[in-house]
Amino acid sequence: LLPGAAYFLAMHYQPARLLIDANLPIAIASDFNPGTCPCLNMNMILNISCTQLKMTPNEAIIAQTINGAAAMELQNELGSIAKGKKANLLLTKPVPSVEYLPYALGSNWIERVFI
């Protein structure tokens, strides 16, 4: 799903809640593209996923990580922290919980990125 494209193009948002409730996996991406979504900020995409697509923070983070990797057939290399996988990690500033992350729009809660 591309919630950023729906936001920037003022289109209807994708039916994430319906898909999740039907037990279908969802991947979330930014669709970084000057014509449809000129946004590389995955914090904003996380916010839109939770506020407009009605996803929980955990669902949206899973959709951006392991499900995103699976959509590109890279789930054996990326998308989760596991032995043998590439360790692309981000370290946040202190936050009260994972549920805080999508609602800190405009705040940069990322302390460091490790690739």
Image (tube, helix red, strand yellow):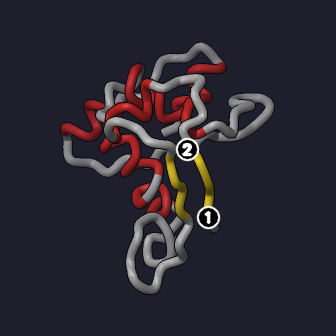
Query: Which residue is outermost to the bottom?
Result: 84
What secondary structure is marked by label 1?
Answer: strand
**What percent of the width, then of the height, locates residue 57?**
34, 37
Q: Residue drawn 60% across and 13% down?
A: 10
Q: Quadrant of residue 70?
A: bottom left
Relative to the observer, which residue lies in front, 102 or 70? Answer: 102
Label count reads 2
Image vertical order of residue 49 relative to residue 52, above or below: below
Which quarter of the rendering shows the C terminus?
Answer: bottom right
Relative to the observer, which residue lies in front, 106 or 37? Answer: 106
Image vertical order of residue 48 relative to residue 1, above or below: above
**What percent of the width, then of the height, locates residue 80?**
41, 66
**What percent of the width, then of the height, locates residue 90?**
54, 56
Left or right: 83 as drawn, with respect to 110:
left
Q: Name the residue under label 1.
A: 114
Query: Which residue is outermost to the right?
Result: 34
Give the CA distance from mark 2 to mark 1: 20 Å
- The amino acid type of the residue labelled 2 equals Ala
Using a 10 Å C-alpha cutoff, classify the residue at mark 1 as few (fewer than 14 neighbours), some (14 to 19) or many (20 or more).
Answer: few
Q: Name the residue under label 2.
A: 29
Relative to the observer, which residue lies in front, 70 or 79? Answer: 79
Q: Quadrant of residue 38?
A: top right
Q: Residue drawn 47% across and 28% down?
A: 47
